Image (tube, rainbow, N blue to C red):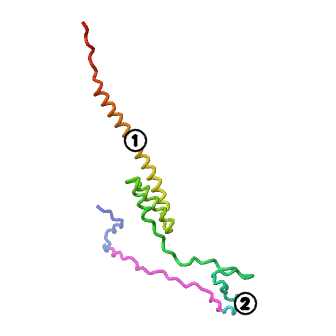
Amino acid sequence: MTQDHTPEPSPGTPHEPAAAYEPAAYEPPTYEPAAYEPAPAYEPAAPPQQPAYAAPPPPQIPPSGGYYQQPQAGYYAPPPGYGYPQAPRATNTMAILALVFAFLAAPLGLVFGFIAKSQIKRTGEDGDGLATAGIIVGAVFTALWVLFMIIGLVFFATAVNVIHDVGTHVPTSPTMTS
């Protein structure tokens, strides 16, 4: 049930239906343009003045044929250039193998490390650190391998000796005398 808030017509007055609701048409607000002052007239800048000094003379190549020139009095020398980019030096293959074989077969790593050191001295390749690491790791692992072999041989010799002694010294039972 809806409640109607319209008053009831009094008796005897004709009842008029209410007009349909129509919203007012939307009109955007109007804005008046702001009053701006006119821009000042453009005045070109004054022409550039001539410098009070003369331009420096072009650099001269010294008679020695070098590229670097000592600075003249009052002038700074330009910084030295970097030159052309150089290709990276190759790493010595034996140095890489020295480090790899130091873990796989330690004596080979030791040998490859010394070979790589001599090649690097002769050719100037990279890889000196790898060769040194191969020598050190190869030496340590070779020493551990030799120590392990000595301990194994001592253990084996002792075991053989004990077995041999047990086989030759068969305990005899004491004889009974009557």
Residue 10 image-quadrant placement: bottom left
Looking at the rendering, the stretch of residues picked out in magenta corresponds to 18-42
Q: How many marks?
A: 2
**Residue drawn where x is 40% and y is 80% of the image:** 25
What's the amino acid at mark 2? Ala
The structure residue drawn at horizontal position 73% and vertical position 90%, both measured from the top left corner, is 54
Q: Which of label 2 and label 1 is nearer to you?
A: 1
As rendered, which of 58 and 133 lies closer to the eye? 133
Q: Is residue 167 above or below residue 100?
A: above
Q: Which x, y percent locates residue 134? A: 45, 56
- The residue at which mark 1 appears reads as 150
Residue 27 horizontal/vertical position (percent) = 44, 81
Relative to 170, say whether 55 is above or below: below
The dot on residue 54 is: 2
- At horizontal 51% and vertical 65% (from top left) the residue drawn is 121
- Mark 1 or mark 2, which is nearer the start of the sequence? 2
* Magenta region includes residue 131: no
Nearest the eye: 130 or 81: 130
Q: Locate the N terminus and report the quarter of the image it occupies.
A: bottom left
Number of residues whose C-alpha sits closer than 10 Å to that of mark 2, classed few (under 14), some (14–19) or many (20 or more)? few
Does dot 2 land on a helix, a strand or a loop? loop
Q: Quadrant of the C terminus?
A: top left
